[in-house]
Amino acid sequence: MYANGTTLRYTNADHARVLREPIPQDIAVIPEIFMRIVVIVLLCLIVASLASALGFLLNDRGRGRRTATALSLRVGISIVLFVVLMAAYHFGFIQGKL
């Protein structure tokens, strides 16, 4: 309520106008930046898992199971990355290329 006793009232036209207004560009960029960060982190995890598998292969000389575990982890992270990219494209977080 204002000092003069009146209240602010919204009409259906006000709500429709708000819904038609475009999203400001600085807010629209946030999902794209977030997706870039997610993709970069997942790619770094894939490379780290591949490097650790190489280290396990060299240290264990192929006799241990750590190499297979690290490579399985890499495949799992790759599948997660693929699913995240498909979901992000479906929901409009990415339009074309990152």
Image: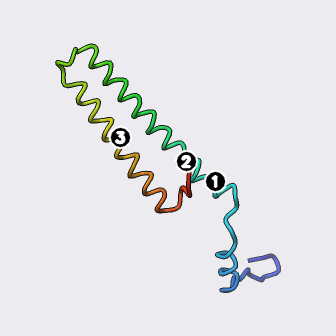
Residue identifier under label 2: 34
- Direction from residue 43 to residue 75 in the image, left or right: left
| Amino acid identity at mark 3 | Ile
**Disc sitting over residue 29 in the figure:** 1
Q: Is residue 84 left or right of residue 3?
A: left
Rendered residue at 48%/62% (across/down): 91
Q: Which amino acid lies under the numbered mark 1 shown in the image of this protein?
A: Val
Instruction: Count neighbours of disc 3 (C-alpha within 10 A) and say few if under 14, some if 14 to 19, many if 20 or more.
Output: some
Question: Please, is residue 51 above or below residue 3 in the view?
Answer: above
Q: Secondary structure at mark 2?
A: helix
The answer to which of 21 and 4 lies nearer the viewer is 21
Classify residue 25 as left or right of residue 37.
right
Residue 52 position by quadrant: top left
Residue 54 position in % (x across, y down) = 32, 21
Identity of the amino acid at label 2? Phe
Residue at position x 46%, y 62% in the image: 90
Residue 77: which numbered mark, if any? Answer: 3
